[in-house]
Amino acid sequence: MQRLQRLQRLCLTVSVVSVLFAQALDAQQRPDLSGDWTRAVDSASAGGRTVAVTGDASFRRGDMGSGWGASLVVRQRADSLILEYDFFSAYDLQPRVRLAYAMDGSESRNSVMIGHAASGQRARLTWQGNAVVITTSHPAPRSADGWASETEVRHTVTLESPNTLVVEVARAGVPGGAATTTRTVYIRK
C-alpha cells in the first residue's frame, strides 16, 4: 500500500513539474515586442504619415491599417503589454493614446478619449505560439431597432524579425458592413 502511495505521489510530482517546466519554456520562447516602431512606407499608404504628423494635409484613401498610428511604442512587461501612439496633431495639445493589456489573459479595460466623449474598450490578450492576439470589444452604434451592440477587433502581433513587427487586424462587420482584414508592417526605429 505504501509503495502504491509513493508511486502516486511521484507521478503527481512529475506531472506538476512537467507542466511548470513547459510553461516556463513557453514563456522563455515568447518574443519581446518592446521598442519604438514606425510603419513601413509602401505605395498604398499615405507616405507613412498620419494626421498627427501632417496636420491639415489632405487625406488619401486607404484601409484602416492597424488602427494604432504610424509611430508606435510597445513596452512588454511580465504583467502587461503597453501600446502608445499619437492620434492627435501636435497643435491639439492632447496626450498620446495609451492602451494597457494584462499578460495573464484577464480582461483589460481601456478608455480612449477621441472626440467629445470617452469610449470604453474591453480586451483580452492571449499568446498563440509566438504571436500576441488582442481581442477588443468596442461599443458600436445603436441598431435601427434601438439595441446597443458591440463590435470585435482582433489584433495579431508578430515579431517577424528583430526589426520587423507585423500587425494583422480582423474587424467584424458592423450592421450593414462587411468584415475586413488588414496587415501593417512596422520597422524598428
Image: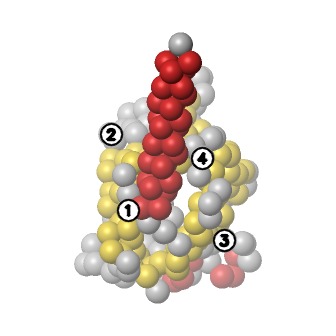
Identify the amino acid type marked 2.
Answer: Ala
Instruction: Please state if 132 lies on the left or on the right of 164 as rendered.
Output: right
State the SS at label 2: loop
Packing grade of label 3 (10 A; few <14, some 14-19, many >=20) is few
Residue 81, given in percent of the width and then of the height, sits at 59, 60
Identify the amino acid type marked 4.
Answer: Asp
- Give the CA separation, mark 2 to mark 3: 30 Å
Q: Which residue is mark 3?
A: 96
The residue nearer to you, when weighing 134 against 65, is 134
In the image, farthest residue toward the left: 43
Residue 150, given in percent of the width and then of the height, sits at 54, 34
Packing grade of label 2 (10 A; few <14, some 14-19, many >=20) is few
- Give the CA separation, mark 1 to mark 4: 18 Å
- Give the CA separation, mark 1 to mark 3: 23 Å
The reply to whether discs 4 and 3 touch (Cβ–Cβ < 8 Å) is no
Q: Which residue is mark 1?
A: 158
Packing grade of label 1 (10 A; few <14, some 14-19, many >=20) is many
The residue that appears at 38% across and 62% down in the rendered structure is: 158
Mark 4 or mark 3: whose residue is earlier in sequence: 3
Mark 2 or mark 3: whose residue is earlier in sequence: 3
Mark 1 or mark 3: whose residue is earlier in sequence: 3
Mark 2 or mark 1: whose residue is earlier in sequence: 1
Q: Which residue is mark 2?
A: 178
- Give the CA separation, mark 4 to mark 3: 25 Å
The residue nearer to you, when weighing 21 against 123, is 21
In this rendering, the label closer to the viewer, 4 or 2 = 4
The reply to whether discs 2 and 3 touch (Cβ–Cβ < 8 Å) is no
Q: Which residue is mark 4?
A: 104
Mark 1 or mark 4: whose residue is earlier in sequence: 4
